[in-house]
Amino acid sequence: MWTRIKDAMCGVSALMIVAAAAGPVAAQSKAPIRIGEINSYSGLATVYTFPYREGLLMATKEINDAGGVLGRPIEFIFRDDKLKPDEAVKAARELVGQEKVDFLAGCISSGVGLAISAYAKEAKVLYIATHCQTSRLTWDDGHKYVAHTTNNVNQYVRALAQKAASMRYKKWAHISPDYEYGHNVWEEFSAYLKQLKPDVEFVQQNWPKLGETDHSSYVTALLQSGADAFLSSVWGAQEIAFVKQARPFGLFEKVHYFSASVGNPDELDPLGKEAPVGAITPGFAWYDDGMQKRHPKLAEWVKKYEARAKKEPTLGASWGYASAYIIAEAIKRAKSADTDKVITAFSEGFEMEFPWGKVIMRGCDQQAIPPQWVGVVRMNAQGKPVLADVEEVHGKDVIKSCDEVAKLRAAAAEKKK
Amino acid sequence: MSGLSVGMFLFLVSVGMSLIFGVTRIVNLAHGSFYMVGAYLMVTLVEVLPDRPWAFWLALLLAPLGVAVLGAVIEVGLLRLIYHRDPLMQLILTFGLILVISTLVLLAWGPDNKSVSRPDALAGSVRIFGQPFPSYYLLVLGLAPVVAVGLWLIFYRTRWGMLIRAATVDREMLGALGVNVAALYTQVFAFGSWLAGLGGALAAPTVAVALGMDGDVLTTAFVVVVIGGLGSFAGSFISALLVGLLQSFGILVFPAVSIVLLFAIMAVVLVVRPWGLLGRPEE
């Protein structure tokens, strides 16, 4: 029943959002290159997708103000997927069939990304996945009609595992939501950690369901596990609840907390003074001195983003921004908006400089390889939690190689038979 | 212990739902939305009020009242028009309210996750039987039984409570005796909303205040009310405890089936006693 309620709710707000988002595009004489953008613009994922869309539209405006791509403006046509694969595919069909878009883009949910990708393969339309992170998209289930312009789980989890391996902890536990993402993170993390540091032991596992609100029994279990450190891949509202419930038990003082996502502002800001100081986590710490020194153009980009969005940027905002530029670059290299030619451009691979460093679009799997950052949660002078001591590793130094990806694809193809 | 405190949250929310159903015969699907609004109001009040220890308690008092006002407005403006319509119409209306409220919350508070800090006095933990236990949960463990006893006193020791009990049995007769039933409905609806708001305001410091918290709580509260018996307060209390303990221990003992287990119990109750553990069969 609840799904149906959500459905209807999403429908209502989707209309409003689409109307608001389709926004003005600089008037140019030539017909625009049109990209259907399917993402979750209602309900609980909006905390990620709204900043992402700001970044995307900011880049679109810059590109169009500078004359567009091949003299044509680019235009995104937004659709709400309601976080559901079937809704997303419905929107994809409509965008391709009625709106006659040149390409498809978008996704925050991995399930949605995989569903659009399957549709794109069958319909022979190029789908540029932008915001979801599952590695399966371009690896196990990869094909030439899908490219992925942002990080995948493999890279940031390996960066985190690399940091973990450099520390003294031997006994590990974890708490991960019991669905594909949670399993994916734990498998990647534990395997890479074991590879880097063969004497680690995995002493205990916790699998709360996705969206669980009461974590007391897992907190007790972690306290009694005897682990030196644990990895969390619960995220968003659920991780906030977990942190708030674990604090009074003193969990973070007894077992070192590693998290796949607690360093993102959508979690740190609301946690405020209850933030888990000392936690080690990836994150886009644009405010960090070291970050700004390494990337001198970052501060200016942040200023521009804030002027536009009236909010501080998030990792998702940087991804939206980068995605629009990467799509434009591929079209530029193809010298055409023709699907096959743009696919050729992606499959040849290219590199781009962004205010936060180099992003490699790797040809063999059409997967983006950005820089990775891992830091420690600390309180700044104003008593606000921030990510500090940020270390940078480039994704290219940790990501699975093209050969490994080929093996994954072969294994997946074997499984299907 | 933590199972007990989960049960107490559930009790506060579900008893309001049960109360509203008992008197007005409306299954208020928007009850979870009232819970969410209670939590969001708590966020705003704590932000707006000066940063003093008493601010938290004042907010805890005001936020549920705000929800009660919202409930009263909705009752007078919308529900009053459809009491005599098909129950399906009432379901559709409260469905609609979920969508409207959730969109309004998104517009008013934005998409970001929010959070309320516990008051400093309750931020730590105490040792009970040698195990650390968050002291904030003690507040909840203490408050819910107070509410339960308060409800009992109101229902069985005051004239207003007597009228409410009378309304659950025969509202036409009550009207014929000269009681202003319309006003009584508004009061009951506002009171039920207050309980939902109190649940939300109390829960706010233990979770993230975020879009979607309405749906999670609605499903569980609904199960609680159905197991306990629609309209039965003692039933809500017992079944809230049962569900709370089940959710906490179930995941430890049978992690794979704990979600199914909840609904399985509801199904068994519905088969054996379709009117719930302590409910009354419809005549």
Image (spheres, rainbow, N blue to C red):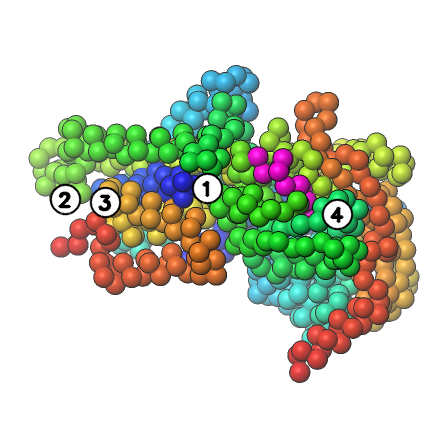
Asked if the residues shown at circle 1 and circle 3 are in contact, with their CB atoms under 8 angstroms apart, the answer is no
Choose top left, top right, bottom left or bottom right for residue A289.
Answer: top right
Q: Which residue position holds label 2?
A: B169
Residue lying at 33% horizontally and 45% vertically, measured from the top left: B240
Q: Find the magenta span and give its range.
A: A250-264
Query: In this view of the protein, can residue A183 be seen by the observer?
Result: yes
Nearer the viewer's eye, disc 1 or disc 3? 3
**What residue would you read off at disc 3?**
B232
Asked which secondary structure carries label 2, the reply is helix
Single out the mark in the foreground, 3 or 4.
Answer: 4
Whichever of callouts 1 and 3 sits on the residue coming sooner in the sequence is 1
The image quadrant that residue A274 belongs to is top right
Q: Position of residue A16 (x, y in %)?
A: 58, 47
Q: Is residue B200 above or below residue A96?
A: above
Q: Tell me the number on the disc at residue A164.
A: 4
Q: CA distance from mark 1 to mark 2?
A: 32 Å
Circle 1 chain: B
Tag 4: amino acid: Ala
- Disc 1 designates what residue? B101
Q: Is residue A261 visible?
A: no
Name the chain under label 4.
A
- Going by the numbered disc 2, the residue's amino acid type is Val
Letter of the chain that mark 3 sits on in the rendering: B
- SS at badge 1: helix
